[in-house]
Image (spheres, rainbow, N blue to C red):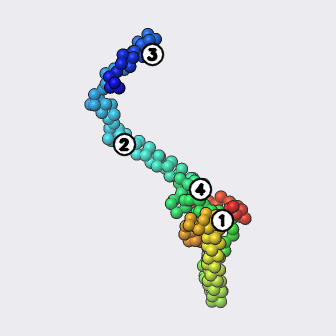
């Protein structure tokens, strides 16, 4: 029967017994549970608390630095959830490849603030109207960008795979190019395939 070992199945009668090699044991008794726990014990509070705190700060700083560099480089592991995925990468590359009117919105606003310090009422009025006109042109540019991107994403990934990316594209298009995170990975005019 299968439950009753035959003399050929008995331990010690296999190849090792035939070759004459002695059977080696563990060489030591099994440690008791108390011995194993004692060997694993570590102090709850380190002996040098200042050194432990310094090491913890250093490890946290290294971790933050790795995350910062990874995010700037566009590494998926370090990106926030809003920036992850192939659709978002496509949007980032498309927005970074084109010139958006909104990129210069912040410098224009700064210029209008400076113009408001000029005591001439006409100069201030022209500056404010120019700012509003520039803002409206930026909004139209962003709306056109959203429509074009939605079509391109539907063609590339399928209509059901297109996430709501218009707002993401708009916010990226309105930022100055050097201040964008993740940093632009493509040059101007280098549109994604």
Q: Residue furthest front?
A: 1
Q: Quadrant of the C terminus?
A: bottom right
Q: Sequence order check: which comes first, mark 2 or mark 3?
A: 3
- How packed mark 1 is, by other alpha carbons closer than 10 Å (few <14, some 14-19, many 20 or more), is many
Q: Nearer the viewer, mark 4 or mark 3?
A: 3
Quadrant for residue 133, please give it.
bottom right
Q: Is disc 3 placed on a helix, strand or loop?
A: helix
Q: Sequence order check: which comes first, mark 4 or mark 2?
A: 2
Give the label on residue 15, or none: 3
- How far apart marks 2 and 3 lie (CA) works out to 57 Å
Q: Is disc 1 placed on a helix, strand or loop?
A: helix
- How far apart marks 2 and 1 lie (CA) works out to 51 Å
Residue holding disc 2: 49
The residue nearer to you, when weighing 2 against 120, is 2
Q: Nearer the viewer, mark 2 or mark 3?
A: 3
Asked whether residue 102 appears in the rendered view, the answer is no
Q: Quadrant of the N terminus?
A: top left
- How packed mark 3 is, by other alpha carbons closer than 10 Å (few <14, some 14-19, many 20 or more), is few
Q: Residue furthest right?
A: 189
- How far apart marks 4 and 3 lie (CA) works out to 58 Å
Q: Is disc 2 placed on a helix, strand or loop?
A: helix
């Amino acid at each position: 029967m299968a439950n009753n070992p035959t003399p050929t199945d008995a331990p010690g009668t296999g190849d090792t017994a035939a070759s004459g090699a002695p059977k080696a044991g563990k060489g030591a008794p099994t440690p008791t549970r108390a011995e194993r726990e004692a060997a694993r014990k570590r102090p709850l509070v380190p002996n040098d608390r200042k050194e432990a705190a310094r090491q913890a700060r250093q490890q946290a700083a290294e971790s933050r630095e790795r995350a910062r560099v990874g995010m700037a480089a566009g590494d998926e592991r370090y990106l926030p959830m809003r920036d992850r995925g192939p659709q978002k990468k496509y949007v980032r590359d498309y927005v970074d490849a084109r010139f958006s009117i909104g990129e210069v919105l912040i410098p224009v606003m700064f210029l209008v603030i400076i113009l408001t310090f000029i005591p001439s009422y006409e100069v201030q009025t022209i500056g404010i109207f120019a700012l509003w006109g520039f803002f409206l042109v930026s909004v139209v540019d962003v709306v056109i960008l959203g429509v074009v991107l939605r079509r391109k994403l539907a063609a590339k990934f399928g209509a059901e795979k297109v996430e709501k990316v218009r707002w993401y594209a708009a916010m990226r298009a309105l930022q100055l190019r050097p201040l964008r995170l993740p940093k632009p990975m493509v040059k101007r005019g280098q549109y994604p395939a």
